[in-house]
Image (cartoon, rainbow, N blue to C red):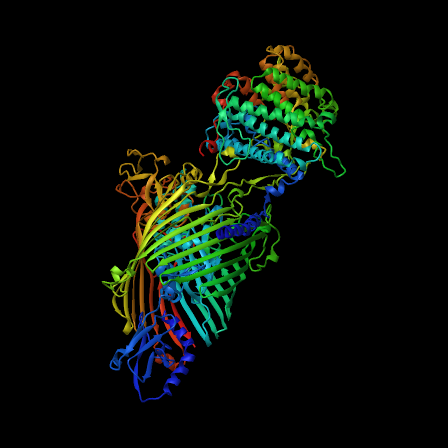
Amino acid sequence: MRNKIISLSLAVLLLPIMSGCGKWLDVQPYDKIAEDDLLSTEEGFMMLLNGIYIELNDDMLYGGALTVEMIEIMGGAYTLGTDDSVWGNYNDIASYEYGTEYWRARFDETWNKAYSLILNCNQLLSRIDDSREIFSGDNYFIIKGEALALRAMLHFDMLRIFGPVYTRHPDAPAIPYYTGYTVTPEEIEPASSIAGKILADLHEARILLSADPVITEGTRMESQGDGSSDFLNFRSLRLNYYAVTGLLARASLWFGDKEQAFSYSQEVIRAANGGIFPFVDRALVTGSPSDPDRIFSSEVIFALSHARRNELFNDYYDPSRLPNYVFRMDNDMFSNRIYGGTDTGGNADDYRCRVNWIATGSNRYFYKYSDMASTGNIRNTMIPLIRLGEMYLIAAESQSGDLSAGLSYVNIMRSNRGVGNLASLDTRMLQYEYIRELYGEGQLFFMYKRMFTPVLFSTDESRNPLPSDEIFVVPLPDSETQN
Amino acid sequence: MSLILTIAAAAAMFPAVLSAQDAASANSETENISGTVVDASDGYPLIGVSVMLEGTLHGVATDLDGNFTLDISSSPCNIVFSYVGYETVTLEFDGTNASSFSRIIMKGNALELNDVVVTGVYERKKESFTGASATFKGDQLKKVGSQNIMQSLQTLDPSFRIMESAQFGSNPNTMPDIEIRGKTSVAGLREEYGTDPNQPLFILDGFETTLETVMNLNMNRVASVTILKDAASTAIYGSKASNGVVVIETKTPAKGRLQLSYKGDFGVDIADLSDYNLMNAAEKLEFETLAGVYTDGNGDPFNQVRLDNLRNDRLKAIASGVDTYWLSEPIRTGFTHKHNLYAEGGEEKIRYGIGLSYGGVQGVMKGSDRQTLEGNIDLIYRTGKFQFSNKLTINYLNTNDPAVSFSEYAYANPYYRKYNSDGGIDKYLYYPEEGTDDYPVTNPLWNAHLNNYDTSSSFGFTNNFIFEWFIKDYLRFRAKFGITKNDQDDQARLSPLHSMFDDLEDTEKGLFTQTMIRELAYEGDAAVTFGKLIAGRHMVNAVGGFNFSSSKYMNYGYSANGFTDDQFAAPSFANNYPEGDSPDYSETLKRAVSFYINGGYAYDDRYLLDVNYRLDGASMFGTGNKFRNTWSAGLGWNIHNEAFLTDRTDFFQMLKIRGSVGNPGNQNFSAYQAFTTYKFNGWMTNVFGTGVIVNELGNTGLAWQETINYDIGTDITFWEDRINLTFDYFWKDTDPLLAIISTRGSMGVSSVAMNAGSQKTHGWEATFRISPVYRPHEGINWNISINAASSRSRYADIGNSFSRLNEEGKASLAGTTRYYDGGSPTAIWAVRSAGIDPATGQELFIKKDGTYSFTYDVNDEVVVGDTQPKLEGVVGTTLYYKGLYIGCYFRYQLGGQIFNTSLFQKVENIGTQDVYNNQDKRALYDRWSENHREAWFKGISLVQTTDKSSRFVMDENTFTGESINLGYEFPDRMIRKLKLSALSFQLSMNDIFRASSVRVERGIDYPFARSVSVSIGITF
């Protein structure tokens, strides 16, 4: 009895001390942002989401490697010189030598950066459901939808680089898919299983984003101006409802589901026709040659906003860099296939040629990312990742088994580029159109990989690399396989 | 020890003198007995011993020579000799045996410091304690050397090691790595944690403290140091205890009239450059010639003429006698002086002590010094059953470090002159003509003579307050509160004329760096102590308490540049902040709470049991694992108290066997590793404003690192205390290890704090002392002692967790540490070498499967050695002869290996840039050539790289003169003439020589030092 009383009173005495201690031991850092502090407010979630968008501008991701540099060289977009002191390691990647020390390290960095942002998405997603009550309006749906879509997009691009040529080997081992906080690594799964997870995330994102104001009010590419939050403005700088739909179209085509690809691309095209993503205003292209809208910004469904986007031009395309390396298209390719020649659809009057390709000496240089004269314009910061033209090209390719039946989609787009109709459509013609429309946006390599065709480096067919798993499938990075 | 006694005796003298006068006035008709009372350990007379006739109030006290005279009116009677700290002696006087009183020997009793284990939480009689521990008194430590406590502990205890730093040598401003019984954590993580995860816990006067505080502590203030080694003794510190505990008690004021003592230490430090084996001017030029420095690779005749001229100029200089010895330039004889002044006194109720210590240490490199100033006030107030004691310490520290590291002097070529023809210092020893590929060579004297500084000063205080309530003689309550505050400011300035700024614009030259560190720590503790002998046989001890602690650390700094002048060095003359630089700021807050219970039980002083339990909570562990349990149990058997032994012989003074087991933990880890934290991605904002991303991924499930610790040991003393042996066998299993694990890239972070695998260590240590001459009555005692320790560790279940560290090690130039299951943390991994093939001059490697190959493959790495010696320890001898004391201690290390970096980097692997630096003599000799095919080293080449192979692994056996001392305590007669209470002198030599089987450069950035010092102690 007495023992009982003692132990009871001990327990009564110790319990509050212990719980008090628990609180006392709960130390939050001051010199770093603790998760509990950050994710206790709506603004915290918004800052984390915005942080992920900002980091997509990293050199190793869409601020370089995955838009204009590494992936575009792999896509055969550029003609390279032979002098190693100027071109450094670029000739290795142009000949798909993924095993060099430099490129192993580079793929490592791209991989690590992509997955570190996936981790950020997962941190956000792991906390958002417990905090639903702190969000105003539809912000919970918007933030969660965008985070899911970002996670899917990053996984999808890693799958496109490191995974198999999907339609040929859907069950080949590909990449790991991370959906939550974990301190133990996820295993590498077959591509088909990754495909399911990407589509599932995108579907869920699309449902959540049905609350997106872009559907009713368009992209709203201007600031509120009254100091109130711009969180729901500038929708084409976010993975909005149509961007997710566009991603679904792109992914469905990759996974060989043409029916779905067509249906999603149609939905975006319909919305565009409804005025949300109108074709570029002719006046902005031809009317003001000193200040053209080089990226056709009204057609951009999703773009990054990079505060110093002109670095892309200055670091890779600017002819004043000479004699240092400058990326440009092969002259023959340019004048005999893409913007000239017979029966290739090439025409020097093409808006895409007129505003983006400027001659210096005998060469044409690529000015898509050069600043427009008017500074401070949001267009000057945009790196397009999904655009309307791609939707037309997807629709053309996926509307039926017969490619020529998709000719009208290509021609609608061409008519908005100031050039006449094509008479017929085949794979090669479609690929030329891809090059015109998406040059410098990091999609060409994936197009060749998906279609499993030669990479169009040159007009000399014998120089164009033939399709193979060796050139299309990049080995998994060292940091993944050695730890 | 006798110093302490003298002080204590002097303190007790006042009443003693009175009673002696009383005795003199008593009647003198009766019989007188007289004699001298001496200390059993050293034969010194004991002053103020009470000599009483049993059962009466009649008695006297011994005088300053330990003599007494007592008149006795009737016999037989019992005479009782009693003295604080000594066993009471009772002798019967039967009227005839007066002669047997001529010399009374008193032995220190069981409560003498050496025989008490002070854990900082409780004290226990060593005889009845089951833990493995060692206690040393302040002047025992002082007798070994006057540098600092750590140095002396290393000599006296085999388990305590200061890890020698080949990089930093004897830099007085570098804190050493300290280990007790080896490592428990993964090495190589210090960089990631900022703290040494193998560092023991330091307790100063019952409160946790830092290594730096202990290193700064003036040795003369130390009363005792106890090293707690095994689970039974350390578990009371729970989750901080797995690396062992060092408990330091400073002196408390003794009562008596005001007494003043002064202790001074004066020393010189001399750089030990014997490990350097650099080429002289002629050798270096020959080496360069052979290496092809003076041959144009492209056959360019103009350049060849230039190179020939260059070589001829140098040859001429050498012929004219230029052979510069650069190593002597930054070196000086360092003078050290330390002073400690302490005044103490008081009566029953109030005792006080006021101390002032100063330490000025000059390093052996010019511009390197360390000054400490320490003031302390100790107050003890006792009233009835309550005692209040307070210790306040205020300390100031100032350090300076040289701007040019020692290695730069070792690099300078001997064929350059130090000074130009005008006696001035040129900035460059060699400046190449335009259009050549040569590099300019900076004169180290130039950078050293500029107005650079690297200084640090700190000011702080510690106040420890203890309240004790003696509820009953067996029950005591104690509450403690301690607070420590320290402010440190570091400033460093590099002159704009420094060669490192050569390529910068004038407006960006020079660099000033300021760092501020603010620390605040507090700790509180409340405990109840129980100790009672029940029914004469059952000794029960118990302690239960609660402890909380908090420590906050803030570090803030910035840099500025753009000095335009060398002379004016104030930061106000800086023009800018470095481009893109932002202020550094970091802050950590760690908190911990704990509850603890300790129980000790001894049956008849024969069967012993100790148990501990502690519940710890700490802020740096994950929310899922905030609290952790520590337990330990120990058993012991005092065979020497068993009747079957005592009935037959009194040969054994102690024969004890003991064993313990427990699971102390380690929390020397970073404060926020369990937290997921975020940072602003400050490099860009967008229309939506700023953004944040994950900075570090925390692991909320992180479990504490704990070490299961087993120990069995024995303490044996026999042959009238002449032979003493302590032996311990221990094994430890740290499971789980806590480490920063490299992760797969897809985890999204490159590393995460995780629990991974375990580390198992087993080893033994022994201390043996014999006294061939042991005549305490005459104050003559000769001891020979040897201590030895040996341990082996290996990793288990770590799998691939450390692959990143392994890859880094493989890739780094001289990295030979690997982390594999079954491997030892100190193993040297390299590819086996069969030597240099005489035919081709190429190195022949032995592959894993035993076949030979000329191709180096990093995957053929195997264990080719271990840096941990198989056996190490100290042999020593001490001799006491009256007041004279001689002690010599020599450290031996046997059976270890070393990867000889001097051979690896300064004999082979000399690249096109390194050839401009001076190199090891061996780079010239024993090199393979067509005329010398049986060589140990490859041919001279500037382009060939040498890979890590067993060719550079050597057996390392060393023998060091760690401590040689000569002391003298002046006899009382002389002291009294000087009107002093005590006077002593001591001469100490530390690290005076070192013999090693391997010749390798030690002290790369700062040389090692040999030191000689003189200490004096005066008590007024």
Dividing the picture into quadrants, the one containing residue B69 is bottom left
Q: In the figure, is residue B116 to the left or right of B699?
A: left
Q: Position of residue A295 (x, y in %)?
A: 67, 26
From the viewer's side, name the closer residue of A170 and B987: A170
Query: Where is residue B185 shown, x and y percent of the image?
Result: 42, 46
Toward the right, the furthest residue is: A226
For the view shown, which residue lies furthest in the left direction?
B648
Question: Which residue is more in the foreground, B872 or A450?
Answer: B872
| Residue B829 pos. (x, y %) | 35, 41
Judge whether residue B836 can be spotted in this image: yes
Going by the image, does A467 lie left or right of B73? right
The quarter of the image holding the C terminus of chain B is bottom left
Q: Where residue A115 sits: x, y (%)?
A: 54, 32
Q: Is residue A412 above or below residue B217?
A: above
Task: Look at the image and tell me whether residue B366 can be seen.
Answer: no
Depth order, front residue of B369/B592: B592
Question: Camera-side residue: A262 or B633?
Answer: B633
User: At 26% from the left edge and 78% from the top edge, which residue is drawn?
Assistant: B100
**Which residue is at the far front?**
A1
Q: Is the residue B410 above or below the residue B60 in the image?
A: above
Q: Looking at the image, how many numbered discs can be counted on the residues? A: 0
Q: Eyeballing the image, is B125 above or below B79?
A: above
For the N terminus of chain B, the quadrant is: bottom left
